Image: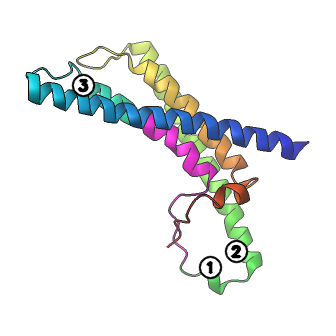
């Protein structure tokens, strides 16, 4: 029962993050292409194109972090663990997971405070006047997904690791 629930959470997070990241990164490419084309051919760039790309880049990064966490694809340096007994390597892995989860939890809390600040002050982007609160809510929710991904990251990695490469150095 718990494994099924974990698998469902894994699939939901993966689908949300993959779809959102794809939309954000493709949107950046389209906006950049249209902006450059308009600027070069018609001397008419997209008004606020720079701000749109900035916001999309933030959104793309925050959609990508849960995927990286879910697949345990963060960069790791493995210089000495091959010298340790597997019992110690497992302990280091558990400690690493706990520290990572606490780290993402802390970042989530800090972004929560920023989100409250953005709502209370009404800060907006310079040119298009897009409220920072809107983007910070999305980023906050995505960090919650990242923290959940950190908790559930090793439950179903065997399936996912067949499709990804390891970043261990």
Q: Nearer the viewer, residue 136 or 66?
A: 66
Give the labeled residue for mark 1: 81
Give the labeled residue for mark 2: 89
Counting residues from the N terminus, which is met first, the one under dot 1 or under dot 3? 3
Furthest residue toward bottom = 83
Kindly report which numbered mark, 3 or 2, lies closer to the viewer in this rendering. Answer: 3
Residue 91 against residue 26 in the figure, above or below: below
Q: Nearer the viewer, residue 24 or 94?
A: 24
Give the labeled residue for mark 3: 49
Please tell me whether the stretch drawn in magenta is mainly helix, strand or loop: helix
Q: Where is residue 22 in the image (x, y as percent from the top left)?
A: 48, 37
Quarter occupied by residue 163: bottom right
Residue at point 30%, 14% (across, down): 129
Q: In which quarter of the image is the N terminus?
A: top right
Q: Is 6 left, or right, of 62 in this rendering?
A: right
Q: Is 17 left, or right, of 12 in this rendering?
A: left
Q: Where is residue 25 in the image (x, y as percent from the top left)?
A: 40, 37
Q: Please provide the residue range marked out in magenta.
A: 59-78
The answer for how far apart the CA atoms under marks 1 and 2 are is: 6 Å
Kindly report which numbered mark, 1 or 3, lies closer to the viewer in this rendering. Answer: 3
Counting residues from the N terminus, which is met first, the one under dot 3 or under dot 2? 3
Q: What is the crowding at mark 1: few (fewer than 14 residues within 10 Å), some, or many (at least 20)?
A: few
Q: What is the crowding at mark 2: few (fewer than 14 residues within 10 Å), some, or many (at least 20)?
A: some
The answer for how far apart the CA atoms under marks 3 and 2 are is: 48 Å
Residue at point 52%, 65% (across, down): 167
Residue at point 51%, 26% (across, down): 138
Counting residues from the N terminus, which is met first, the one under dot 1 or under dot 2? 1
Q: Which structural element holds mark 2?
A: helix
Residue 126 against residue 7 in the figure, above or below: above
Q: Which of 126 and 67 is in front in this view?
A: 67
């Amino acid at each position: 029962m718990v494994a099924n629930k974990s698998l469902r959470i894994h699939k939901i997070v993966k689908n949300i993050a993959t779809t959102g990241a794809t939309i954000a990164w493709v949107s950046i490419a389209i906006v950049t292409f249209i902006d450059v084309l308009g600027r070069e051919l018609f001397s008419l760039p997209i008004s606020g194109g720079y701000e749109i790309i900035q916001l999309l880049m933030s959104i793309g990064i925050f959609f990508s972090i849960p995927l990286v966490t879910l697949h345990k694809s963060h960069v790791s340096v493995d210089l000495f663990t091959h010298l340790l007994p597997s019992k110690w390597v497992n302990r280091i892995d558990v400690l690493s997971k706990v520290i990572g989860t606490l780290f993402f939890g802390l970042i989530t809390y800090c972004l929560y405070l920023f989100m409250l600040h953005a709502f209370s002050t009404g800060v907006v982007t310079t040119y298009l006047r897009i409220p920072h609160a809107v983007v910070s809510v999305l980023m906050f929710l995505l960090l919650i997904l990242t923290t959940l991904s950190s908790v559930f990251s090793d439950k179903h990695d065997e399936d996912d690791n067949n499709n990804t490469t390891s970043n261990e150095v």
